[in-house]
Amino acid sequence: MDLGLSDRVALVTGASSGIGLACVEQLLGEGARVCAVARSVTPLDDLIRRYPDQLVTSSCDLTTTEGCDAAVSTCMSAFGGVDVLVNSAGAAEAVPVLELTREVIDEALLLKLHGYLRMSQRVAPMMVGRGWGRIVMVAGSAGTSPTADNFPISLANIGIHNLVRSLTDALTPSGVLVNAVSPGLTRTPRVETVLARRSADEGIPIADLVDAISAALPAGRIAEPEEVARAVCFLASEAASYVQASVLYLDGGARRATP
Ligand SMILES: NC(=O)c1ccc[n+]([C@@H]2O[C@H](COP(=O)([O-])OP(=O)(O)OC[C@H]3O[C@@H](n4cnc5c(N)ncnc54)[C@H](OP(=O)(O)O)[C@@H]3O)[C@@H](O)[C@H]2O)c1
């Protein structure tokens, strides 16, 4: 299937690692030009070395309005516009709900909910002007599966479901389609760190932790970042021309009991 992404311009946040990095690599593979955004300079420099002709990078903090402005402005200067926005930046800590402070909740929402909204606000008008655009949000299954430890990120993720709907209403009909993916546990550097900490705390080998999590999933395993990125590329493409206001669950069947 031709995704029609050749020469499209994609701005990807969270591009230095995990799901965002996998999205960058697959969008480049489809022939898109990419503006890769994250704070850490070293992984962004590595991307530039690997893809000198198709890619620019912007090192900025997306919890600030200045950071969001800088990301969009880098993409505009390099490529003259933005056809596709992939919002993937996220970094929430697991904190027991009875110990949560307002600061921890605010921090999670600042990056993942306000950041996704701010970036969408900055690119949507130009997409509307061109009569074509795709905004793809990386939410997460915590949005519909709150636990004792994940309240801030679950709040951000369910907020993103509603953001997808609100943006769809605001941008219809304009050719700008807004959708989200909602991954379950995915093997990224952030998850490797969380599992390593849990393994040390509980004295259980990481492989055994992964086996226990996997056994509870119909898929029998956790996801790889490339599997999430493939779905993001589809939603970012011409091929998704009749998909709007949707959340695509990539959770290995974990939600099977929910209608
Ligand atoms: N992995 C999972 O199991 C899973 C499941 C469901 C949903 N998700 C969602 O998927 C997204 C990506 O997660 P991941 O697991 O791929 O995490 P990751 O490997 O830690 O990547 C997170 C990315 O976000 C960037 N980032 C963090 N804070 C930022 C800030 N203030 N400004 C700009 N960029 C920032 C990081 O780069 P710098 O640190 O260099 O800034 C990095 O590129 C997140 O939204 C997460 O909630 C993940």
Image (spheres, helix red, strand yellow):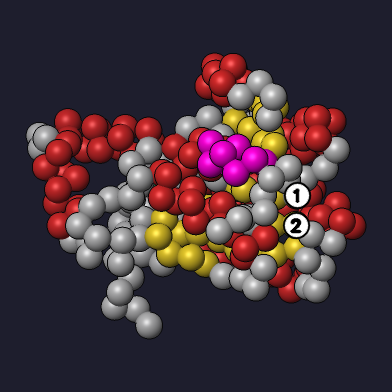
Outermost bottom residue: 259
Residue at x 67%, y 68% (from the top left corner): 241
Q: Amino acid at mark 1?
A: Asp
Outermost right residue: 129
**Mark number displayed over residue 133:** 2
Determine if the magenta segment contains residue 163.
Answer: no
Q: Is residue 153 visible?
A: no
Distance from disc 2 to disc 1, alpha carbons, whole Å, reads 5 Å
Decide which of 98, 84 is in the foreground and name it.
84
Determine if the magenta segment contains residue 31.
Answer: yes
**Residue 147 shown left or right of residue 64 in the figure:** left
Give the mark nearest the N terminus, 2 or 1. 1
Residue at x 69%, y 24% (from the top left corner): 53
Label 1 CA crowd tier, 10 Å (few <14, some 14–19, many 20+):
many
Residue 82: x %, y % from top left: 77, 45
**Residue 108 shown left or right of residue 64 in the figure:** left
Q: Would the CB of label 2 be found within 8 Å of ligand 1?
A: no
- Secondary structure under the numbered disc 2 in the rendered image: strand
Where the N terminus falls, by quadrant?
bottom right
Total numbered circles: 2
**Mark number displayed over residue 166:** none
**Mark number displayed over residue 83:** 1
Q: From which residue to which does the magenta span run?
A: 25-32
